Image (spheres, rainbow, N blue to C red):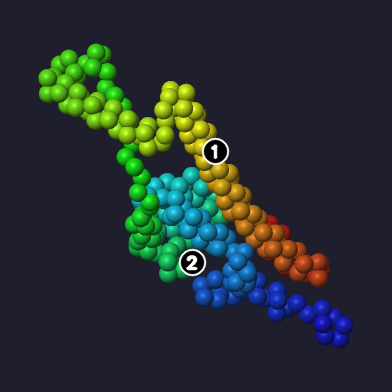
Amino acid sequence: KENNLSVIDEFYESYKRKYKINGKSWYENEQFKKGTSWKSRLQFDIDRLIKQSKDWEEFLKKMVELGYEIKHGKHIAFKPKDKQRFTRSKTIGEDYTEERLRERITENQSIKAPPVKKRIGNVINMNTNAKVKESKGYEYWATKHNLNTMAESVVFIREHGINSVKQLDEYIRKSAEERQNLQDKIKEIDKDMQLLSDTMEQVHTVKKYRAYYKEYKSNPSDKAFFEEYKSQ
């Protein structure tokens, strides 16, 4: 205040002129530093979907499923459904150019997962399989396949200390329960991630409109400010 009078010209003009700082508006730059910019949300969504995608096409598909529109060109750009303009991903960081996004997906896939034992195959029914009846070569292959499958099954049963049909049934039941529990946990994690993403956007929206509201409340007689931001 100066002489007990509110002075808001400088603050107001910062909105009117839309100062640019590192390619961002003054307001957006302030929010970006606080981690509340919607571009921070874009970074967050890209980062988590890269970890979930096995290739570029799957990544793009997941971004669309999350509500983003994608514009291809010299530089790939994204636009959430609640925004009017596309944003080139390269503007949110050097790790977000299309080239780096592709590299990060490849790098993520190159991380070696613990070796998983080959799944035991299914036994082919020699009496009902049409190919067995039509081809002697296939019949020979199917016979060999069935013998190998049964041998692998015996080894598996011995390794897990299964000595009866009852124990086998119990093992199958427990395995099915563990798989279902794991799937349920994955669904809960996905739900939490989506909630966190939505919350980030809501926090940004609240803080953005709060700044406008506080400025207007400090000088409700400023009709020019009101007219410019009433739609907000």
Looking at this view, is 181 or 99 the one in front?
181
Residue 92, x across and y down, in percent: 48, 66
Amino acid type of the residue that numbered disc 1 sits on in the rendered structure = Asn
Looking at this view, is 32 or 166 the one in front?
166
Residue 74, x across and y down, in percent: 35, 62
**Residue furthest bottom as drawn:** 3
Q: Secondary structure at mark 2?
A: helix
| Quadrant of the rendered image containing residue 112 | bottom left
In the rendered image, the quadrant that contains the C terminus is bottom right
Say which label, 2 or 1, has the lower sequence index: 2
Looking at this view, is 114 or 74 the one in front?
114
- For residue 141, which numbered disc appears in the image? none
| Quadrant of the rendered image containing residue 225 | bottom right
Residue on which disc 1 sits: 181
Amino acid type of the residue that numbered disc 2 sits on in the rendered structure = Ile
Mark 2 → mark 1, Cα distance in angstroms = 37 Å
How packed mark 1 is, by other alpha carbons closer than 10 Å (few <14, some 14-19, many 20 or more), is: few
Residue 67 appears left or right of 222: left
Q: Is residue 60 above or below residue 118?
A: below
Residue under the image location 37 percent in, 57 percent down: 111
Looking at this view, is 161 or 56 the one in front?
161
Residue on which disc 2 sits: 92
Residue 11 appears left or right of 155: right
Residue 137 appears left or right of 173: left
| Quadrant of the rendered image containing residue 21 | bottom right
Specify whether residue 140 is in view: yes
Q: Secondary structure at mark 1?
A: helix
Residue 7, x across and y down, in percent: 78, 80
